[in-house]
Image: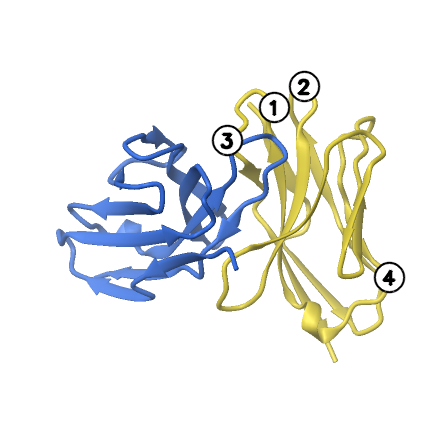
Amino acid sequence: EAAVTQSPRNKVTVTGGNVTLSCRQTNSHNYMYWYRQDTGHGLRLIHYSYGAGNLQIGDVPDGYKATRTTQEDFFLLLELASPSQTSLYFCASSDAGTANSDYTFGSGTRLLVI
Amino acid sequence: GDSVTQTEGQVALSEEDFLTIHCNYSASGYPALFWYVQYPGEGPQFLFRASRDKEKGSSRGFEATYDKGTTSFHLRKASVQESDSAVYYCALGPDTNAYKVIFGKGTHLHVLP
């Protein structure tokens, strides 16, 4: 079954700390996405990619880097974490990025920056 | 720019009530429209889509009809169950930037037994 797996499930870090969130998809999808979910804001797109080595900037990219190492793996990097980045992060994938493509989401990573 | 508006932030119903969650969009061209559902502790799941005017999408008893005239895609269910309690997201798939779906802010549905 097609899947998107995120790790870790939960993470606590200190302000200024370095955090990497991982995402792997077994869907053979070209497109992968990182979102953050916050009360009152819904899902906001951070970065996305349409293939290995590609990176596109989303709507709320400040303070985040991302890297797509393979078709399967997409990482989100917080190099100097701040409390404002405390959030629930979701990774998603989609096929070919056409207008009719639906997204498959992972189960999320809950990040707390103290 | 393109946008999706969900009017209700929260909806509380009793079992067997009729559900309507309103979704209106603003976009140029002819976008695909989606509904996603997110159960507690999980990521959003694709519910269904519609791609052209007057097309009805449906799944699990939920349905919505693409209405280009009123730029709407309202989610409806005739009789909700407690297990339908979740967050529902309306989304827009723009035809000019096909890999970037735009999500509404979500509607939290609480169904009381």
* Amino acid type for the residue under numbered disc 3: Tyr
- Quadrant containing the C terminus of chain B is bottom right
Task: Identify the chain of the residue marked 4, using the numbered disc in the image.
Answer: B
**Labels in figure, total:** 4
* Amino acid type for the residue under numbered disc 2: Gly
Q: How many angstroms separate mark 2 from mark 3 (CA)? A: 15 Å
- Please check whether the numbered discs 2 and 3 fall on a single chain: yes
- The letter of the yellow chain is B
Q: How many angstroms separate mark 1 from mark 4 (CA)? A: 32 Å
Q: Nearer the viewer, mark 1 or mark 4?
A: 1
Residue marked by disc 4: B78
Q: For residue B29, which numbered disc appears in the image?
A: 2
Task: Identify the chain of the residue marked 3, using the numbered disc in the image.
Answer: B
- Residue at coordinates 31% horizontally, 35% vertically from top-left? A52
Residue contact between numbered discs 4 and 3, judged by CB atoms under 8 Å: no
Residue marked by disc 1: B95
- Residue at coordinates 83% horizontally, 26% vertically from top-left? B69
